[in-house]
């Protein structure tokens, strides 16, 4: 798939078929997440793959109503504070977001659907996900990527989201 086509046509998918995701595709998605830029190459993220139906339901409950697409497979994206850049540890948040973006694009290129579900900085969600996975204090839940084969084909091309009034040259 062409990279620009992937960027401009990817959509959030919230309804999936029952078809399981192949292990090779999950590996490729993780590889994409780990291939993005990150602060001083700290690689300050960790990932938890979840395919167990009960665990997915518990994750959805912990993250609230928007997390209902957690039915087939998910990746919990976490920040690893022990690996974070010491002078500015909060870069882990940006690094996690970049990893998530790469994974959504990769999933789309592999014929999968995905939807990004925010967790951090809503501390109630962070604490519930951390407890659910018995995470050490230095591992912080960032977001969840729900994954699966789309229940519907995306037929219509999406309109451009470019907004000229949000772009400034040389000054505000």
Image: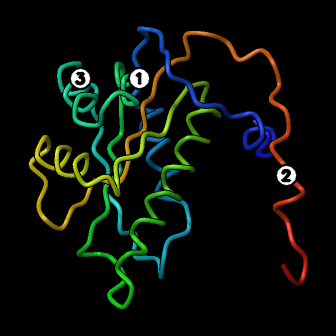
Quadrant of the rendered image containing residue 65: top left
Question: In this image, 77 relative to 156: left or right?
Answer: left
| Residue displayed at 90% across by 76% down | 169
Label 2's element?
Answer: loop
Callout 2 touching callout 1 (CB < 8 Å): no
Q: From the image, which quarter does the N terminus lie in?
A: top right
Pointer 1: what residue? 69
Label 1's element?
Answer: loop
Q: Earlier in the sequence, mark 3 or mark 1?
A: 3
Other residues around mark 1 within 10 Å, as few (<14) / some (14–19) / many (≥20): many
Residue 58 x/y as whole percent: 19, 28
Residue 7 x/y as whole percent: 73, 44
Per the model, the C-alpha gap separating discs 3 and 2 is: 38 Å
| Residue displayed at 46% across by 22% down | 148
Circle nearer the viewer, 2 or 1: 2
Quadrant of the rendered image containing residue 9: top right
> In the picture shown, does residue 45 fall above or below 60?
below
Q: Earlier in the sequence, mark 2 or mark 1?
A: 1
Q: How is the image coloured?
A: rainbow
Depth order, front residue of 130/123: 123
> In the picture shown, does residue 79 fall above or below 74?
below
Q: Which numbered circle lies on residue 147?
A: none
Pointer 2: what residue? 163
| Residue displayed at 84% across by 78% down | 172
Callout 3 touching callout 2 (CB < 8 Å): no
Per the model, the C-alpha gap separating discs 2 and 1 is: 29 Å
Quadrant of the rendered image containing residue 112: top right
> In the picture shown, does residue 147 fall above or below 79?
above
Per the model, the C-alpha gap separating discs 3 and 1 is: 10 Å
Pointer 3: what residue? 57
Label 3's element?
Answer: helix
Q: Earlier in the sequence, mark 3 or mark 2?
A: 3
């Amino acid at each position: 798939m062409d990279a620009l086509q992937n960027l401009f046509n990817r959509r959030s998918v919230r309804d999936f078929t029952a078809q399981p995701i192949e292990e090779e595709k999950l590996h490729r998605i993780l590889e994409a997440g780990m291939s993005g830029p990150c602060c001083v190459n700290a690689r300050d993220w960790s990932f938890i793959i979840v395919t167990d139906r009960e665990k997915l339901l518990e994750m959805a409950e912990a993250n609230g109503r928007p997390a209902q697409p957690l039915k087939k497979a998910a990746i919990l994206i976490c920040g690893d504070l022990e690996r974070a850049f010491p002078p500015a540890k909060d870069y882990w948040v940006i690094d996690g977001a970049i990893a998530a973006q790469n994974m959504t694009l990769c999933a789309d290129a592999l014929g999968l659907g995905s939807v990004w579900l925010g967790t951090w900085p809503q501390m109630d969600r962070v604490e519930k996900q951390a407890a659910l996975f018995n995470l050490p204090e230095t591992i912080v839940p960032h977001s969840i990527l729900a994954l699966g084969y789309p229940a519907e084909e995306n037929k219509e091309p999406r309109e451009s989201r470019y907004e000229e009034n949000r772009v400034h040259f040389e000054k505000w």
